[in-house]
Amino acid sequence: MSGIVGICNLHGEPVSTGLLKRMTDIIAHRGPDGEGHYTDGPVGLGHRRLAIIDLSPAGQQPMSNETGDVVITCDGRVYNSQELRAELEAKGHRFRSRTDTEVVLHSYEEWGEECVDRFNGAFAFAIYDCRPQAMRRSGRQSSVAGRLFLARDRYGIKPLYYYQGNGVFLFASEIKALLQHPAMEKDVDPYALLEYFTFQNIFTDRTLFKGGRLLPAGHTAMLRIDDVGDLCTNQYWDFDFHEPAQVRDPREYEEELDRLFTQAVRRQLVSDVPVGAYLSGGMDSGAITAVAAKEMPYLTSFTCGFDLSSASGLELGFDERERAEALSYRFKTEHYEVVLKAGDMERVLPDLIWHLEDLRMGQCYPNYYVSRLASKFVKVVLGGAGGDELFAGYPWRYYRTVSSQSFEEYTQRYYLYWQRLVGNKVIRRLFQPHVWKAIRDSLTIDIFRGVIHRDLQELATPEEYANRSFYFEAKTFLHGLLVVEDKLSMAHSLETRAPYLDNDLVDFAMKLPVRTKLRELDQVARIDENEPGASMKKYLGKTDDGKQILRSVLARYMPEEYVDGVKQGFSAPDASWFRGDSIDYVRELLINDRACIYEYLRPDTVSELVQEHLRGKKNRRLLIWSLLSFEWWLRRFFR
């Protein structure tokens, strides 16, 4: 993993190496093992190296082919690189390193833009192509060729941001690198702000920085480097959850899932530096640790726990250290823990928001702390991202919609649920008049439909509604989690890998019958909510349904009590802390007329919503976290 940057001056001015270096310096945390810069007239590429495979100087980037007319800067890992390398060598390509970056470079030479279809991994890269055929395709006849090819992995594990305007095209692993260039002016995007305070996420390619865009997952982009600067994006892959034409014996599915799961973990253990694993009390990370521990002696594992002395209600079950310690003993890992208290959130927020920069999702400071812990011992860590989204880990979400009578009813129900922060009835009162004036014609239901209406097919069965929900959450919720995980692990120069997001495993999971994942689908679908006495309350709370086939397979690696439990997310007891230990901190930052957020938000509405939580009237922990994050975001980037 690494940090990448690039500049293209569309009017032909030479790139300043000093400016390119400032862009790489600001993201040095992504690659403390080396830096490199390449310029060719109006084109410049930069790189910060986190050395994982081939630690020798041969792995330095930017990296060029033998003739120097194709140059790459790459962040990421391609887990099938050895197979691709053998195929490319058979076609006559010669290699100077053992890196997967060089495999990506030669793959582009051999297969062009379609090379991304062959990669199984997590990556974001840019290739500057100045071969004669590239000049002809660009329509440019000068000595400087005309194409820059950008790509991001299928799922969005690695980020790639860009900005185009004022005569330049910029790209980088992090937005703060783009901001080092004077062409990108600092301003807030009000449309992204609307998305964030509705969904606690951004579903489009916008960011809170006006003009800053995030190349969507599973997309490539080609830039013609000339005065026109045409940027053409292309979607090369998308999720496709669907029922199989013919259902097989459940035992066949289980055996294949077991094979693909263990294969995925083994693939992602390849490294020239130490590898560890996150180990919570859940089955996803536990099963990964079980397989990894068999392959590697003395595997190191890491857990984040919480001080629950001031917690209450459901939050009393949030600390999973005891369960993690039991698994560590079973798998014989070298185990380390960090225990968080309320004050730990307060002290880490300024640095966390600086690294996160692209605000989305819920409380993530535990991720920051556990990444920092892991980075003291290893440079690579395995995590459980994707297990829930692929295998239906959130049944209380899907069951809200499987009994829908039409696509529109389904959309409305799911849209209401995903208004995680502020609903339509309040959102207008949240924003200052000048902000609302700018965004009042933008409807968040249309943004939602833009994701969920992948095609015009009408859904009819509970399975089809469930599969569309899996699709939506993989495109939005999972993507947000991956963006956050990348930023907070790379803040500590740590590479996080996601075995559940192995291509072969994902392709298999998307074609599984829904009933192999959700045990009670039929029963929920039969409930008529309009019938007197009918209730879905049981199914809209946390249940032990979901991930049924995964539970069956992972029971081969985990104790029974770990695979039969109720799904629980990785979260601190913030609802209690915001009303107790951190109440003064919340009031100081948010119930304060001098707060930065009030340039964009109305103080009376914010106070009303926050006070509802502090008085115990409603649980608004997600909103309070987002308000605190927005306040610190404004302080770190605009003051």
Image (cartoon, grey):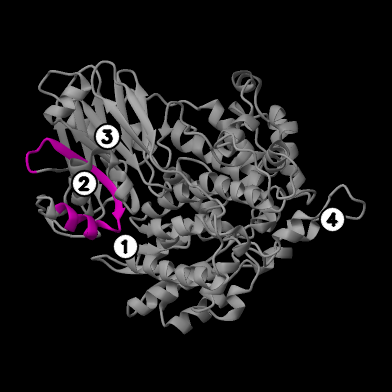
Q: Identify residue for label 1.
A: 379
Please tell me whether residue 383 is drawn above or below residue 105 in the rendered image: below
Q: Nearer the viewer, residue 272 or 114?
A: 114
Provide the residue span drawn in magenta.
66-88
Disc 2 + disc 1, Cβ < 8 Å: no
Of labels 3 and 4, earlier in sequence is 3
| Residue drawn at x 49%, y 33% as measured from the top left | 208
Q: Report the residue marked by disc 4.
A: 535
Q: Residue at x 47, y 72 (%)?
A: 255
Which callout, 3 or 1, points at the residue further toward the start of the chain?
A: 3
- Would residue 95 be found to the left or right of residue 127 on screen? left
User: Quick check: can you spot residue 570?
Assistant: yes
- How crowded pointer 3 is (Cα within 10 Å; few <14, some 14-19, many 20+) is rated as many
| Mark 1 nearby-residue class (10 Å; few <14, some 14–19, many ≥20) | many
Q: Amino acid at mark 2?
A: Ser
Sequence-earlier tag: 2 or 1: 2
Label 3 sits on residue:
149
